[in-house]
Amino acid sequence: MPINRFSCRNRTQAILFLVIAALLWSSGGLFIKVVSWHPLAIAGIRSFFSALVMGLFFGARAVNFSRAQLAGAAAYAGMVTMLVVSTKMTTAANAIFLQYTAPVYVALLSYVLLREKISRGDWWMMGLVFGGMTLFFLDDLSWGSLAGNLFGIGSGLSFAAFAIALRLQKGAAPAGSVLLGNLLTFLIGIPFYAAPYPDAAGWGALVILGVFQLGFSYYFYTEAISYVTALEAVLIPVIEPVLNPVWVFLVLGERPGTMALIGGAIVLVVITARCAMKAGRS
């Protein structure tokens, strides 16, 4: 029986839910960094705990196994898995800022799959963002950091595919795709659930990642999204990419490179401004 005790009932509550979701998402970089285990194992166990939360809140009613929902689940699994790999291989700032390039790929995929025209403003957004992305690769990178950046881009591409799949579900809430995507991510991780296992602190971080950073965050986001304006839905979640590297720096002292910071600022400002402009006209 799904739990509905914390259902959203008005816009004020929805804004609070969005803020909570963004704050929970922003903790991902820190807790992923502190777990000493294979990144695919981290992604799988995190999604296992998240699936338990989503199942408690939404139950089987969220799942219809439509093609669009299954496509969304596959894209979600790619998004969360590659973000974990990216966070482990490069800085948390690089990983989250590169994932945040997803709106660029949404515009391109919408043109290819949905035959939607790309506006002049979107072309400008893509040019500036791709220019900002090149700065991530101008720092003094090791092979691991370079690969981590590429996985960050892959996470952004998967995020875009997830967004397109939700649109193909004709406005359906993302709960079904998220629940199935978490189960798929857990299955992908099975070959990597091997020793040496995390210590007690690592398991605690995994529980926090699954239950709160991924599980409760998507519940709050799913409940809030239909009560807020398009502009609020764009601007409030920007809390995540801003705070994610801040937590990692404050606790672990990880510093992204200067060029990466400049590139991240370009990506963040350009995409947020463009999405805000589009939302303001909707």
Image (cartoon, rainbow, N blue to C red):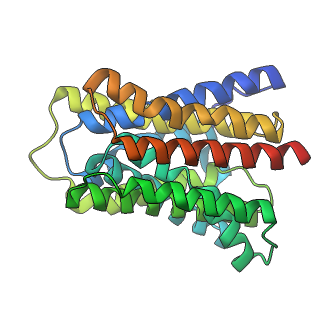
Q: Residue furthest left?
A: 196
Q: Which of the pair 243/166 is nearer the observer? A: 243
Residue 255 drawn at (x, y percent): 31, 34
Where residue 106 sits, quadrant-wise, is bottom right
Q: Residue furthest right?
A: 281
Residue 281 drawn at (x, y percent): 90, 47
Residue under the image location 34 percent in, 32 percent down: 30
Residue 206 drawn at (x, y percent): 31, 35
Residue under the image location 74 percent in, 38 percent down: 233
Left or right of 5, for residue 157: left
| In the image, residue 256 above or below residue 194 | above
Q: Which of the pair 205/147 is nearer the observer? A: 147
| In the image, residue 46 above or below residue 109 | above
Left or right of 243, for residue 272: right
Q: How many numbered discs?
A: 0
Quadrant of the drawing holding the N terminus: top right
Q: Which of the pair 65/248 is nearer the observer? A: 248
Residue under the image location 39 percent in, 46 percent down: 259
| Camera sees residue 51 | no
Residue 31 drawn at (x, y percent): 33, 33
Q: Which of the pair 250/273 is nearer the observer? A: 273
| In the image, residue 57 above or below residue 62 | above
Residue under the image location 80 percent in, 65 percent down: 120
| Camera sees residue 176 | yes
Where residue 35 sits, quadrant-wise, is top left
